Image: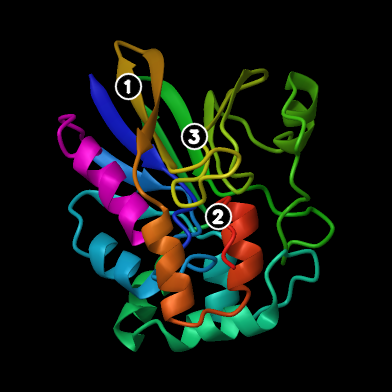
């Protein structure tokens, strides 16, 4: 039996990450995998990186926000503005550059005959610099098209922020954002994937915490786009 803790889209929310890790560290896992976007949107990207760089048996996929950090903001479809990305970059210590550069676009594993792929989201075939447009209607047909270029049994992905678990040409698993509570409030999310004698089982977890503390950090640090982010991603509106 092999057990993997999975989370995605922490987005600079160190409190949500600590809540998830406190839970996962009690589960006798073999490894932990982040599906990307550890940084940005939330106010504490550097604090998040301080945590994950000290985790044993941990791998992080590269999300679009890691790409923005490494190569510059160049996505007109993103809901975050260039000023926010620049602020994020100036608040991350250079000691984390090597870790971010070592993130991988895709991680493939085969465990007990089960082929697994861990990815933030597929890249556009005609424009491989950017990710595909988010599929908000996660039906079998839509996900089969989205992941048409993948040949694997299980695909764990993120980016959309909303949890989704669909069986199509593969088993498509999205635990939902760890760091952005929307469409709920004061919720963080993670998943445990278990492979046992070639059988795959997934368990989805929603954990409570006080995300208003993170919103307060946005305002204390005068983070750009804090009004938009706090109301849309955290469901907190500040006067």
Quarter placement of the N terminus: top left
In the rendered image, residue 134, in percent from the top left (x then y), is placed at 74, 46
Q: How did the renderer colour the structure?
A: rainbow
Q: Is residue 190 left or right of residue 68?
A: left
> Dot 3: what SS?
loop
Q: Residue at x 56, y 65 (%)?
A: 238
Q: Residue at x 39, y 15 (%)?
A: 201
Label number found at residue 236? 2
Q: Is residue 217 left or right of residue 82?
A: left
Q: Is residue 94 left or right of residue 130?
A: left
Query: Is residue 170 or residue 35 the one in the foreground?
Result: 35
> Dot 2: what SS?
loop
Q: CA distance from mark 1 to mark 2?
A: 35 Å
Q: CA distance from mark 1 to mark 3?
A: 14 Å
Question: Of marks 1 and 2, which one's residue comes earlier in the chain?
Answer: 1
Residue 12 in sight in this render: no
According to the picture, the residue beneath numbered tag 1 turns out to be: 194
Q: Residue at x 40, y 16 (%)?
A: 200
Magenta region: 12-30
Most distant residue in the front direction: 239
Query: Is residue 176 or residue 181 the one in the foreground?
Result: 181
- Label 1 vs label 3, nearer the camera: 3
Label number found at residue 175? 3
Residue 208 vertical placement versus 131 (above, below): above
Residue 41 in sight in this render: yes
In the rendered image, residue 187, in percent from the top left (x then y), is placed at 43, 40
Question: Of marks 1 and 3, which one's residue comes earlier in the chain?
Answer: 3
Quarter placement of the C terminus: bottom right
Q: Residue at x 23, y 36 (%)?
A: 23
Residue density around tag 3, few if under 14, some if 14–19, many if 20 or more, within 10 Å: many
- Magenta stretch contains residue 23: yes
Residue 95 vertical placement versus 145 (above, below): below
């Amino acid at each position: 039996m092999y057990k993997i803790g999975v989370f995605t889209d922490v987005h600079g929310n160190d409190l949500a990450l600590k809540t998830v890790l406190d839970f996962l560290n009690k589960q006798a896992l073999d490894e932990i995998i982040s599906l990307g976007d550890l940084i940005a949107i939330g106010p504490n990207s550097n604090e998040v990186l301080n945590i994950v760089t000290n985790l044993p048996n941990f791998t992080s996929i590269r999300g679009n926000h890691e790409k923005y950090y490494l190569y510059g903001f160049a996505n007109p479809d993103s809901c975050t503005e260039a000023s926010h990305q620049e602020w994020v970059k100036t608040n991350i210590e250079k000691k984390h550059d090597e870790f971010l550069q070592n993130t991988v676009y895709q991680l493939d594993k085969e465990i007990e005959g089960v082929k697994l792929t861990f990815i933030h989201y597929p890249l556009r075939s005609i424009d491989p610099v950017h990710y595909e447009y988010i599929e908000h209607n996660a039906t079998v047909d839509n996900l089969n098209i989205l992941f048409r270029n993948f040949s694997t049994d299980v695909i764990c992905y993120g980016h959309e922020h909303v949890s989704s678990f669909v069986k199509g040409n593969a088993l498509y698993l999205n635990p939902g954002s760890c760091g952005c509570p929307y469409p709920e409030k004061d919720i963080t999310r993670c998943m445990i994937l278990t492979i046992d004698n070639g059988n795959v089982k997934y368990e989805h977890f929603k954990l409570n915490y006080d995300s208003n503390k993170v919103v307060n950090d946005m305002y204390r640090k005068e983070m750009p786009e804090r009004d938009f982010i706090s109301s849309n991603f955290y469901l907190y509106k500040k006067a």
